[in-house]
């Protein structure tokens, strides 16, 4: 009977280890996905700011050219 108890205790420890590893991996992936989303939002905002600045400069150049004529 003692052999079965030891085997069951060992099996239980292995299952706990596997569950802990899986939980850690899930947390890591969730955090990585969240960080990637935040980075994408920041890059999108920066891209739109640069794009808007370029459009504004082009409009100013068009207006200045029209005023000169």
Image (cartoon, rainbow, N blue to C red):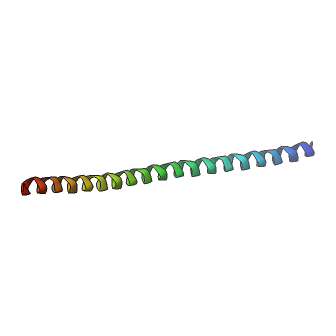
Q: Residue 56 or 45: which is nearer the viewer?
A: 56
Q: Residue 11 or 63: which is nearer the viewer?
A: 63
Left/right of residue 33 with respect to residue 47 in the rendered view: right
Horizontal and vertical percent for residue 48? 31, 51
Residue placed at 48% from the left, 51% from the top?
36
Horizontal and vertical percent for residue 44? 37, 51
Residue placed at 26% from the left, 52% from the top?
52
Horizontal and vertical percent for residue 55? 24, 52
Location of the C terminus by quadrant is: bottom left
Horizontal and vertical percent for residue 7? 87, 45
Q: Residue 6 or 40: which is nearer the viewer?
A: 40
Location of the N terminus by quadrant is: top right
Left/right of residue 7 with respect to residue 45 in the rendered view: right
Left/right of residue 35 with respect to residue 44 in the rendered view: right
Residue placed at 26% from the left, 55% from the top?
54
Residue placed at 25% from the left, 56% from the top?
53
Residue furthest to the front in view is 69
Q: Residue 42 or 19: which is nearer the viewer?
A: 42
Q: How many marks?
A: 0
């Amino acid at each position: 009977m003692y052999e079965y108890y030891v085997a069951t205790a060992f099996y239980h420890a292995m299952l706990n280890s596997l569950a802990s590893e899986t939980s850690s991996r899930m947390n890591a992936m969730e955090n990585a996905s969240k960080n990637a989303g935040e980075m994408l939002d920041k890059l999108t905002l920066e891209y739109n700011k640069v794009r808007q600045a370029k459009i504004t400069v082009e409009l100013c150049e068009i207006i200045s050219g029209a005023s000169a004529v």
